[in-house]
Protein backbone atom coordinates (compact mmCIF):
# COMPACT_ATOMS: atom_id res chain seq x y z
CA UNK A 1 0.00 0.00 0.00
CA UNK A 2 1.45 3.35 -1.00
CA UNK A 3 1.78 6.09 1.60
CA UNK A 4 2.63 8.99 -0.69
CA UNK A 5 0.57 12.15 -0.75
CA UNK A 6 -0.76 12.35 -4.29
CA UNK A 7 -1.21 15.55 -6.24
CA UNK A 8 -4.91 14.90 -6.04
CA UNK A 9 -4.78 14.96 -2.27
CA UNK A 10 -3.03 18.32 -2.35
CA UNK A 11 -5.66 19.72 -4.67
CA UNK A 12 -8.43 18.40 -2.44
CA UNK A 13 -6.83 19.74 0.74
CA UNK A 14 -8.42 23.16 0.46
CA UNK A 15 -11.90 21.70 0.11
CA UNK A 16 -11.30 19.21 2.90
CA UNK A 17 -10.16 21.94 5.29
CA UNK A 18 -13.22 24.00 4.43
CA UNK A 19 -15.61 21.20 5.35
CA UNK A 20 -13.58 20.06 8.33
CA UNK A 21 -12.15 16.83 6.96
CA UNK A 22 -8.62 15.56 7.46
CA UNK A 23 -8.50 14.18 3.94
CA UNK A 24 -4.76 14.23 3.17
CA UNK A 25 -4.08 12.01 6.17
CA UNK A 26 -5.75 9.15 4.31
CA UNK A 27 -3.42 9.49 1.35
CA UNK A 28 -2.53 5.80 1.45
CA UNK A 29 -4.24 4.67 -1.70
CA UNK A 30 -6.68 1.77 -1.70
CA UNK A 31 -6.25 -0.61 -4.60
CA UNK A 32 -7.90 0.92 -7.67
CA UNK A 33 -10.89 -0.87 -9.11
CA UNK A 34 -11.55 -2.72 -5.83
CA UNK A 35 -14.88 -4.16 -4.77
CA UNK A 36 -16.23 -1.73 -2.21
CA UNK A 37 -18.76 -1.88 0.64
CA UNK A 38 -20.10 1.16 2.44
CA UNK A 39 -21.21 0.05 5.92
CA UNK A 40 -22.74 2.58 8.28
CA UNK A 41 -24.70 3.08 11.46
CA UNK A 42 -26.95 6.15 11.54
CA UNK A 43 -29.10 7.12 14.48
CA UNK A 44 -30.61 10.35 13.11
CA UNK A 45 -29.99 10.12 9.34
CA UNK A 46 -26.93 12.36 9.10
CA UNK A 47 -24.47 9.51 8.63
CA UNK A 48 -26.86 7.80 6.21
CA UNK A 49 -26.76 10.80 3.88
CA UNK A 50 -22.94 10.65 3.69
CA UNK A 51 -23.00 6.88 3.19
CA UNK A 52 -25.56 7.18 0.38
CA UNK A 53 -23.39 9.74 -1.40
CA UNK A 54 -20.29 7.56 -1.10
CA UNK A 55 -22.04 4.42 -2.33
CA UNK A 56 -23.54 6.25 -5.28
CA UNK A 57 -20.26 7.87 -6.29
CA UNK A 58 -18.35 4.59 -6.08
CA UNK A 59 -21.06 2.29 -7.41
CA UNK A 60 -20.49 0.40 -4.15
CA UNK A 61 -22.72 -1.93 -2.21
CA UNK A 62 -24.23 -0.40 0.90
CA UNK A 63 -25.08 -2.01 4.22
CA UNK A 64 -26.85 -0.36 7.12
CA UNK A 65 -25.82 -1.56 10.57
CA UNK A 66 -29.22 -1.92 12.20
CA UNK A 67 -29.44 -2.54 15.96
CA UNK A 68 -31.49 -5.56 16.97
CA UNK A 69 -33.06 -3.28 19.59
CA UNK A 70 -33.67 0.14 17.97
CA UNK A 71 -32.56 3.23 19.86
CA UNK A 72 -35.33 5.49 21.14
CA UNK A 73 -35.04 9.24 21.63
CA UNK A 74 -34.72 8.59 25.33
CA UNK A 75 -31.92 6.11 24.72
CA UNK A 76 -30.00 8.76 22.76
CA UNK A 77 -30.44 11.63 25.23
CA UNK A 78 -26.98 12.69 26.40
CA UNK A 79 -25.97 12.65 30.07
CA UNK A 80 -29.22 11.14 31.30
CA UNK A 81 -27.79 7.74 32.19
CA UNK A 82 -29.77 6.26 29.33
CA UNK A 83 -28.85 3.35 27.10
CA UNK A 84 -26.37 5.17 24.84
CA UNK A 85 -24.60 6.73 27.86
CA UNK A 86 -24.30 3.33 29.53
CA UNK A 87 -22.92 1.65 26.42
CA UNK A 88 -20.36 4.37 25.76
CA UNK A 89 -19.16 4.17 29.36
CA UNK A 90 -18.65 0.41 28.99
CA UNK A 91 -15.87 -0.52 26.50
CA UNK A 92 -17.06 -4.14 26.55
CA UNK A 93 -20.61 -3.29 25.47
CA UNK A 94 -21.58 -4.98 22.19
CA UNK A 95 -25.12 -4.09 21.10
CA UNK A 96 -26.58 -6.82 18.89
CA UNK A 97 -27.00 -6.22 15.15
CA UNK A 98 -30.01 -7.32 13.14
CA UNK A 99 -28.87 -9.24 10.03
CA UNK A 100 -25.43 -9.10 8.47
CA UNK A 101 -23.32 -8.74 5.35
CA UNK A 102 -23.98 -11.78 3.16
CA UNK A 103 -20.48 -12.19 1.70
CA UNK A 104 -17.87 -9.99 3.32
CA UNK A 105 -15.13 -11.95 1.57
CA UNK A 106 -15.90 -10.35 -1.80
CA UNK A 107 -15.00 -6.84 -0.62
CA UNK A 108 -11.50 -5.39 -0.82
CA UNK A 109 -12.40 -2.02 0.70
CA UNK A 110 -14.89 -1.09 3.44
CA UNK A 111 -15.98 2.47 4.15
CA UNK A 112 -17.19 2.52 7.76
CA UNK A 113 -19.49 5.34 8.85
CA UNK A 114 -20.86 6.30 12.26
CA UNK A 115 -21.89 9.30 14.39
CA UNK A 116 -19.68 10.46 17.25
CA UNK A 117 -21.08 9.57 20.68
CA UNK A 118 -19.16 10.98 23.62
CA UNK A 119 -16.08 11.34 21.44
CA UNK A 120 -16.16 7.73 20.28
CA UNK A 121 -17.80 5.45 17.73
CA UNK A 122 -21.00 3.85 19.05
CA UNK A 123 -20.30 0.40 20.52
CA UNK A 124 -22.39 -1.20 17.79
CA UNK A 125 -19.45 -0.41 15.46
CA UNK A 126 -17.33 -2.65 17.69
CA UNK A 127 -19.93 -5.39 17.26
CA UNK A 128 -19.73 -4.99 13.49
CA UNK A 129 -15.94 -5.12 13.33
CA UNK A 130 -15.75 -8.21 15.51
CA UNK A 131 -18.36 -10.02 13.42
CA UNK A 132 -16.16 -10.50 10.34
CA UNK A 133 -12.66 -11.44 9.30
CA UNK A 134 -11.40 -8.16 7.85
CA UNK A 135 -7.80 -9.28 7.40
CA UNK A 136 -6.16 -7.66 4.40
CA UNK A 137 -9.06 -5.34 3.68
CA UNK A 138 -8.70 -1.58 3.42
CA UNK A 139 -10.93 0.22 5.93
CA UNK A 140 -11.67 3.91 5.58
CA UNK A 141 -13.66 5.28 8.54
CA UNK A 142 -15.77 8.42 8.45
CA UNK A 143 -17.88 10.02 11.13
CA UNK A 144 -20.52 12.71 11.40
CA UNK A 145 -20.56 15.31 14.12
CA UNK A 146 -21.66 18.90 14.57
CA UNK A 147 -18.44 19.87 16.31
CA UNK A 148 -16.25 16.98 17.48
CA UNK A 149 -13.56 15.75 15.11
CA UNK A 150 -12.99 12.09 14.38
CA UNK A 151 -10.34 12.18 17.09
CA UNK A 152 -9.39 8.93 18.78
CA UNK A 153 -12.65 7.27 17.67
CA UNK A 154 -10.74 6.17 14.58
CA UNK A 155 -7.57 4.82 16.21
CA UNK A 156 -9.50 3.13 19.00
CA UNK A 157 -11.21 0.88 16.45
CA UNK A 158 -7.99 -0.47 14.96
CA UNK A 159 -7.43 -3.17 17.58
CA UNK A 160 -10.82 -4.67 16.68
CA UNK A 161 -9.55 -5.48 13.16
CA UNK A 162 -5.77 -5.41 13.55
CA UNK A 163 -5.00 -7.24 10.30
CA UNK A 164 -6.87 -4.68 8.18
CA UNK A 165 -5.15 -1.77 6.45
CA UNK A 166 -6.70 1.24 8.17
CA UNK A 167 -6.73 4.61 6.44
CA UNK A 168 -7.02 7.75 8.55
CA UNK A 169 -10.65 8.77 8.78
CA UNK A 170 -12.47 12.05 8.37
CA UNK A 171 -15.34 13.97 9.94
CA UNK A 172 -18.26 15.49 8.09
CA UNK A 173 -20.85 17.92 9.42
CA UNK A 174 -24.53 17.79 8.54
CA UNK A 175 -25.16 19.37 5.15
CA UNK A 176 -21.98 18.08 3.53
CA UNK A 177 -22.55 17.93 -0.22
CA UNK A 178 -22.11 15.08 -2.68
CA UNK A 179 -19.32 16.99 -4.45
CA UNK A 180 -17.42 17.33 -1.19
CA UNK A 181 -17.67 13.57 -0.61
CA UNK A 182 -16.52 12.93 -4.18
CA UNK A 183 -13.46 15.15 -3.65
CA UNK A 184 -12.64 13.36 -0.39
CA UNK A 185 -12.87 9.92 -1.98
CA UNK A 186 -10.69 11.00 -4.89
CA UNK A 187 -8.11 12.42 -2.52
CA UNK A 188 -8.08 9.20 -0.53
CA UNK A 189 -7.47 7.14 -3.65
CA UNK A 190 -10.73 5.20 -3.36
CA UNK A 191 -11.85 4.33 -6.87
CA UNK A 192 -14.86 2.47 -8.15
CA UNK A 193 -14.32 -0.59 -10.30
CA UNK A 194 -14.97 0.21 -13.96
CA UNK A 195 -18.38 -0.91 -15.12
CA UNK A 196 -18.14 -3.93 -17.38
CA UNK A 197 -19.54 -3.40 -20.85
CA UNK A 198 -20.05 0.36 -20.51
CA UNK A 199 -18.35 2.45 -23.18
CA UNK A 200 -15.97 5.10 -21.87
CA UNK A 201 -16.08 7.73 -24.61
CA UNK A 202 -13.29 9.76 -23.01
CA UNK A 203 -10.86 6.85 -22.98
CA UNK A 204 -12.46 5.32 -26.11
CA UNK A 205 -12.48 1.93 -24.43
CA UNK A 206 -14.77 -0.64 -22.83
CA UNK A 207 -14.04 -2.86 -19.83
CA UNK A 208 -14.54 -6.52 -20.67
CA UNK A 209 -15.85 -9.11 -18.23
CA UNK A 210 -12.38 -10.68 -18.36
CA UNK A 211 -10.97 -7.60 -16.62
CA UNK A 212 -9.18 -6.27 -19.70
CA UNK A 213 -9.84 -2.93 -21.37
CA UNK A 214 -10.48 -2.94 -25.12
CA UNK A 215 -10.68 -0.03 -27.60
CA UNK A 216 -14.17 0.49 -29.02
CA UNK A 217 -12.96 1.41 -32.51
CA UNK A 218 -10.43 -0.43 -34.63
CA UNK A 219 -9.53 -2.03 -37.94
CA UNK A 220 -10.87 -5.19 -39.54
CA UNK A 221 -8.35 -6.91 -41.81
CA UNK A 222 -10.66 -9.27 -43.70
CA UNK A 223 -9.70 -9.51 -47.41
CA UNK A 224 -6.47 -7.55 -46.91
CA UNK A 225 -3.47 -9.22 -48.54
CA UNK A 226 -0.19 -9.53 -46.67
CA UNK A 227 1.30 -6.21 -47.80
CA UNK A 228 -2.05 -4.37 -47.71
CA UNK A 229 -2.59 -5.65 -44.20
CA UNK A 230 0.86 -4.56 -43.03
CA UNK A 231 0.36 -1.07 -44.45
CA UNK A 232 -3.19 -0.76 -43.08
CA UNK A 233 -2.23 -1.83 -39.58
CA UNK A 234 0.72 0.56 -39.72
CA UNK A 235 -1.59 3.41 -40.78
CA UNK A 236 -4.03 2.57 -37.97
CA UNK A 237 -1.31 2.55 -35.32
CA UNK A 238 0.21 5.79 -36.61
CA UNK A 239 -3.23 7.43 -36.45
CA UNK A 240 -3.71 6.38 -32.81
CA UNK A 241 -5.87 3.30 -33.35
CA UNK A 242 -5.08 0.36 -31.11
CA UNK A 243 -7.63 -2.40 -31.97
CA UNK A 244 -6.91 -4.90 -34.76
CA UNK A 245 -9.09 -7.82 -35.84
CA UNK A 246 -7.62 -10.71 -37.84
CA UNK A 247 -8.19 -14.46 -38.22
CA UNK A 248 -6.56 -17.66 -39.37
CA UNK A 249 -8.83 -17.67 -42.44
CA UNK A 250 -7.73 -14.16 -43.43
CA UNK A 251 -4.19 -15.42 -44.00
CA UNK A 252 -2.65 -12.22 -42.66
CA UNK A 253 -1.86 -12.88 -38.98
CA UNK A 254 1.87 -12.72 -39.73
CA UNK A 255 1.47 -9.32 -41.40
CA UNK A 256 -0.47 -8.01 -38.39
CA UNK A 257 2.27 -9.17 -36.02
CA UNK A 258 5.03 -7.72 -38.19
CA UNK A 259 3.33 -4.31 -38.32
CA UNK A 260 2.92 -4.31 -34.55
CA UNK A 261 6.55 -5.26 -33.95
CA UNK A 262 7.77 -2.63 -36.39
CA UNK A 263 5.56 0.12 -34.95
CA UNK A 264 7.65 0.75 -31.85
CA UNK A 265 4.43 1.05 -29.84
CA UNK A 266 4.48 -0.80 -26.49
CA UNK A 267 2.80 -4.17 -26.90
CA UNK A 268 0.44 -3.62 -23.96
CA UNK A 269 -1.13 -0.61 -25.69
CA UNK A 270 -2.37 -2.70 -28.62
CA UNK A 271 -5.36 -5.07 -28.58
CA UNK A 272 -5.31 -7.92 -31.10
CA UNK A 273 -8.22 -10.22 -31.87
CA UNK A 274 -7.79 -13.38 -33.92
CA UNK A 275 -9.96 -16.43 -34.62
CA UNK A 276 -9.62 -20.14 -35.16
CA UNK A 277 -11.78 -21.84 -37.78
CA UNK A 278 -14.06 -24.92 -37.80
CA UNK A 279 -12.73 -28.14 -39.22
CA UNK A 280 -9.15 -29.15 -38.55
CA UNK A 281 -8.54 -26.21 -36.20
CA UNK A 282 -11.48 -27.11 -33.94
CA UNK A 283 -10.40 -30.75 -34.06
CA UNK A 284 -6.83 -29.84 -33.01
CA UNK A 285 -7.33 -26.60 -31.07
CA UNK A 286 -4.06 -26.67 -29.13
CA UNK A 287 -2.18 -26.77 -32.42
CA UNK A 288 -4.37 -23.99 -33.84
CA UNK A 289 -3.75 -21.77 -30.83
CA UNK A 290 0.00 -22.27 -31.05
CA UNK A 291 -0.08 -21.58 -34.78
CA UNK A 292 -1.76 -18.21 -34.12
CA UNK A 293 0.78 -17.38 -31.44
CA UNK A 294 3.65 -18.26 -33.76
CA UNK A 295 2.31 -16.32 -36.75
CA UNK A 296 1.51 -13.19 -34.77
CA UNK A 297 4.73 -13.42 -32.73
CA UNK A 298 3.67 -10.68 -30.33
CA UNK A 299 3.97 -12.60 -27.06
CA UNK A 300 0.30 -13.17 -26.26
CA UNK A 301 -3.09 -12.85 -27.89
CA UNK A 302 -5.45 -10.28 -26.38
CA UNK A 303 -8.56 -12.12 -27.53
CA UNK A 304 -9.25 -15.31 -29.45
CA UNK A 305 -12.64 -16.12 -30.98
CA UNK A 306 -14.24 -19.19 -32.45
CA UNK A 307 -14.96 -18.06 -36.02
CA UNK A 308 -18.44 -19.62 -36.17
CA UNK A 309 -20.29 -22.61 -34.71
CA UNK A 310 -19.14 -26.02 -35.88
CA UNK A 311 -18.19 -29.55 -34.85
CA UNK A 312 -15.91 -29.60 -31.79
CA UNK A 313 -16.57 -25.93 -31.01
CA UNK A 314 -16.94 -26.67 -27.29
CA UNK A 315 -13.71 -28.70 -27.37
CA UNK A 316 -11.94 -25.82 -29.09
CA UNK A 317 -13.27 -23.27 -26.63
CA UNK A 318 -12.13 -25.34 -23.65
CA UNK A 319 -8.66 -25.51 -25.17
CA UNK A 320 -8.75 -21.71 -25.37
CA UNK A 321 -9.80 -21.65 -21.70
CA UNK A 322 -6.66 -23.62 -20.88
CA UNK A 323 -4.58 -21.15 -22.90
CA UNK A 324 -6.07 -18.36 -20.78
CA UNK A 325 -4.97 -20.19 -17.64
CA UNK A 326 -1.46 -20.43 -19.14
CA UNK A 327 -1.36 -16.71 -19.97
CA UNK A 328 -1.19 -17.25 -23.74
CA UNK A 329 -4.60 -15.63 -24.32
CA UNK A 330 -6.19 -12.90 -22.19
CA UNK A 331 -9.85 -12.94 -23.26
CA UNK A 332 -12.17 -15.25 -25.17
CA UNK A 333 -15.08 -14.66 -27.50
CA UNK A 334 -17.32 -15.96 -30.25
CA UNK A 335 -18.10 -14.84 -33.77
CA UNK A 336 -21.41 -15.44 -35.52
CA UNK A 337 -23.26 -16.75 -32.48
CA UNK A 338 -26.87 -15.67 -32.04
CA UNK A 339 -29.46 -16.23 -29.31
CA UNK A 340 -30.20 -19.88 -29.99
CA UNK A 341 -26.53 -20.74 -30.46
CA UNK A 342 -25.57 -18.93 -27.25
CA UNK A 343 -28.29 -20.63 -25.23
CA UNK A 344 -26.94 -24.00 -26.31
CA UNK A 345 -23.25 -23.17 -26.05
CA UNK A 346 -22.79 -21.16 -22.85
CA UNK A 347 -23.87 -23.88 -20.37
CA UNK A 348 -21.14 -26.14 -21.77
CA UNK A 349 -18.16 -23.84 -21.09
CA UNK A 350 -16.54 -22.38 -17.99
CA UNK A 351 -15.42 -18.89 -19.05
CA UNK A 352 -18.18 -16.56 -20.20
CA UNK A 353 -17.17 -15.02 -23.52
CA UNK A 354 -16.03 -11.42 -23.21
CA UNK A 355 -17.22 -10.56 -26.70
CA UNK A 356 -19.56 -11.75 -29.44
CA UNK A 357 -18.78 -10.50 -32.94
CA UNK A 358 -21.62 -10.53 -35.50
CA UNK A 359 -22.62 -8.79 -38.72
CA UNK A 360 -24.25 -5.48 -37.77
CA UNK A 361 -25.03 -2.47 -39.97
CA UNK A 362 -28.06 -0.20 -40.56
CA UNK A 363 -29.63 -2.69 -42.98
CA UNK A 364 -29.06 -5.63 -40.59
CA UNK A 365 -29.32 -4.36 -37.04
CA UNK A 366 -29.86 -7.40 -34.79
CA UNK A 367 -32.01 -5.31 -32.45
CA UNK A 368 -33.24 -8.45 -30.70
CA UNK A 369 -29.79 -10.04 -30.43
CA UNK A 370 -27.69 -7.11 -29.21
CA UNK A 371 -29.63 -6.50 -25.96
CA UNK A 372 -29.64 -10.24 -25.22
CA UNK A 373 -25.87 -10.50 -25.55
CA UNK A 374 -25.31 -7.34 -23.52
CA UNK A 375 -27.64 -8.63 -20.79
CA UNK A 376 -25.18 -11.49 -20.28
CA UNK A 377 -22.36 -9.05 -19.55
CA UNK A 378 -20.84 -9.70 -22.98
CA UNK A 379 -19.65 -6.89 -25.26
CA UNK A 380 -20.98 -6.84 -28.83
CA UNK A 381 -18.74 -6.13 -31.80
CA UNK A 382 -19.97 -5.58 -35.34
CA UNK A 383 -18.27 -6.76 -38.51
CA UNK A 384 -19.32 -5.36 -41.89
CA UNK A 385 -20.32 -2.11 -40.13
CA UNK A 386 -20.36 -0.33 -43.50
CA UNK A 387 -22.39 -3.04 -45.21
CA UNK A 388 -19.68 -5.33 -46.52
CA UNK A 389 -18.50 -6.25 -49.98
CA UNK A 390 -20.82 -5.19 -52.76
CA UNK A 391 -23.09 -3.23 -50.43
CA UNK A 392 -20.94 -0.39 -49.06
CA UNK A 393 -21.74 2.11 -51.80
CA UNK A 394 -25.51 1.66 -51.36
CA UNK A 395 -25.27 2.07 -47.61
CA UNK A 396 -22.99 5.11 -47.72
CA UNK A 397 -25.30 6.69 -50.27
CA UNK A 398 -28.47 6.08 -48.28
CA UNK A 399 -30.53 9.29 -48.26
CA UNK A 400 -31.19 9.24 -44.52
CA UNK A 401 -27.57 8.60 -43.65
CA UNK A 402 -26.32 11.28 -46.03
CA UNK A 403 -28.74 13.82 -44.59
CA UNK A 404 -27.60 13.17 -41.03
CA UNK A 405 -23.96 13.30 -42.13
CA UNK A 406 -24.51 16.69 -43.79
CA UNK A 407 -26.11 18.07 -40.63
CA UNK A 408 -22.98 17.16 -38.63
CA UNK A 409 -20.41 17.95 -41.28
CA UNK A 410 -19.07 14.39 -41.25
CA UNK A 411 -19.05 11.46 -43.66
CA UNK A 412 -21.73 8.78 -44.00
CA UNK A 413 -19.21 6.24 -42.74
CA UNK A 414 -18.63 8.28 -39.59
CA UNK A 415 -22.39 8.49 -38.96
CA UNK A 416 -22.78 4.72 -39.26
CA UNK A 417 -19.82 4.02 -36.99
CA UNK A 418 -21.00 6.54 -34.41
CA UNK A 419 -24.49 4.97 -34.53
CA UNK A 420 -22.90 1.64 -33.64
CA UNK A 421 -20.95 3.11 -30.75
CA UNK A 422 -24.06 4.78 -29.31
CA UNK A 423 -25.79 1.39 -29.44
CA UNK A 424 -22.91 -0.11 -27.46
CA UNK A 425 -21.42 -1.94 -30.45
CA UNK A 426 -17.64 -1.95 -31.00
CA UNK A 427 -16.74 -1.33 -34.64
CA UNK A 428 -13.93 -2.75 -36.79
CA UNK A 429 -14.37 -1.34 -40.31
CA UNK A 430 -11.95 -2.68 -42.88
CA UNK A 431 -9.93 -0.41 -45.14
CA UNK A 432 -6.63 -0.24 -46.96
CA UNK A 433 -6.89 3.54 -47.46
CA UNK A 434 -4.93 5.51 -44.82
CA UNK A 435 -7.27 8.50 -45.20
CA UNK A 436 -10.33 6.33 -44.57
CA UNK A 437 -8.62 4.64 -41.64
CA UNK A 438 -7.94 8.02 -40.03
CA UNK A 439 -11.48 9.21 -40.78
CA UNK A 440 -12.99 6.07 -39.26
CA UNK A 441 -11.17 6.77 -36.00
CA UNK A 442 -12.53 10.33 -35.80
CA UNK A 443 -15.89 9.59 -34.17
CA UNK A 444 -15.81 11.61 -30.98
CA UNK A 445 -16.35 15.19 -32.10
CA UNK A 446 -20.08 14.77 -32.66
CA UNK A 447 -23.03 12.91 -31.17
CA UNK A 448 -26.21 11.67 -32.80
CA UNK A 449 -29.48 12.89 -31.31
CA UNK A 450 -32.26 10.57 -30.18
CA UNK A 451 -34.21 11.51 -33.28
CA UNK A 452 -31.25 10.73 -35.54
CA UNK A 453 -30.70 7.39 -33.82
CA UNK A 454 -34.38 6.59 -34.35
CA UNK A 455 -34.16 7.49 -38.04
CA UNK A 456 -31.16 5.19 -38.45
CA UNK A 457 -32.87 2.42 -36.52
CA UNK A 458 -35.80 2.68 -38.94
CA UNK A 459 -33.50 1.65 -41.82
CA UNK A 460 -33.38 -1.99 -40.67
CA UNK A 461 -34.28 -4.40 -43.48
CA UNK A 462 -33.10 -7.60 -41.76
CA UNK A 463 -30.86 -7.82 -44.83
CA UNK A 464 -27.83 -10.00 -44.10
CA UNK A 465 -24.88 -9.55 -46.46
CA UNK A 466 -22.91 -12.72 -45.68
CA UNK A 467 -23.80 -16.31 -44.88
CA UNK A 468 -22.47 -16.56 -41.32
Image (cartoon, helix red, strand yellow):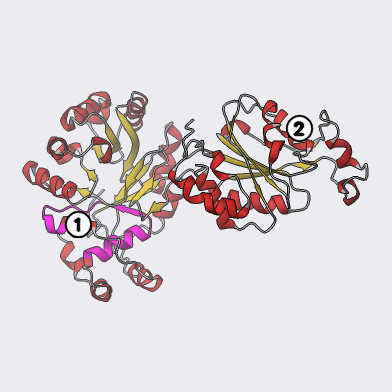
Q: Which residues are magenta?
A: 413-436
**Does 387 sit left or right of 56 as displayed?**
left
Q: Label 1: state its secondary structure.
A: loop
Question: To which residue does mark 1 refer?
Answer: 388
Image mark for residue 342: none
Displayed quadrant of residue 365? bottom left
Q: Considering only vertical position in the picture, is 295 above or below 64?
A: above
- Pointer 1 and pointer 2: residues touching (CB < 8 Å)? no
In the image, is residue 158 part of the stretch drawn in magenta? no
Q: Considering only vertical position in the picture, is 188 above or below 203?
A: above
In the rendered image, residue 301, in percent from the top left (x then y), is placed at 26, 33
Observer-nearest of 446 and 255: 446
In the rendered image, residue 128, in percent from the top left (x then y), is placed at 72, 34
In the rendered image, residue 66, in percent from the top left (x then y), is placed at 77, 43
In the image, is residue 420 part of the stretch drawn in magenta? yes
Q: Considering only vertical position in the picture, is 442 above or below 84?
A: below
Image mark for residue 127: 2
Q: Residue at x 9, y 46 (%)?
A: 231
Q: Is disc 2 surrounded by few (<14), some (14 to 19) or many (20+) residues within 10 Å?
A: some
**Residue ranking furthest to the left:** 227
Q: Does residue 118 appear anywhere in the picture?
A: yes
Q: Does residue 277 appear anywhere in the picture?
A: no
Q: Residue at x 8, y 41 (%)?
A: 226
- Disc nearer the start of the sequence (1/2): 2
Tell which tag, 1 or 2, sits nearer the viewer.
2
Q: Label 2: state its secondary structure.
A: helix
Observer-nearest of 68 and 428: 68
**Does 226 sit left or right of 175 as displayed?**
left
Q: How many marks?
A: 2
In the rendered image, residue 230, in percent from the top left (x then y), is placed at 10, 43
Observer-nearest of 428 and 194: 194
Q: Is disc 1 surrounded by few (<14), some (14 to 19) or many (20+) residues within 10 Å?
A: some
Amino acid sequence: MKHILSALCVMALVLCLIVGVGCPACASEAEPDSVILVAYFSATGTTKAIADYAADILGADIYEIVPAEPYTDADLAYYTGGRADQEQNDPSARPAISGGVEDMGQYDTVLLGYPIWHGQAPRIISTFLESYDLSGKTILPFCTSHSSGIGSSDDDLHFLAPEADWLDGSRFPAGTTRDEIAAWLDACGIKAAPQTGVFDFERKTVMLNSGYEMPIMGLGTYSLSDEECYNSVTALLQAGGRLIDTAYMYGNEAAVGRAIRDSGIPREEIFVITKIYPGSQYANPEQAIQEALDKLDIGYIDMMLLHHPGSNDVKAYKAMEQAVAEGKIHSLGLSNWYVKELEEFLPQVNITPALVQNEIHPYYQENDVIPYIQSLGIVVQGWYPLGGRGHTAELLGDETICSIAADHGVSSAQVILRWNLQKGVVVIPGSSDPDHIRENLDLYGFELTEDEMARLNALDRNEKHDWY
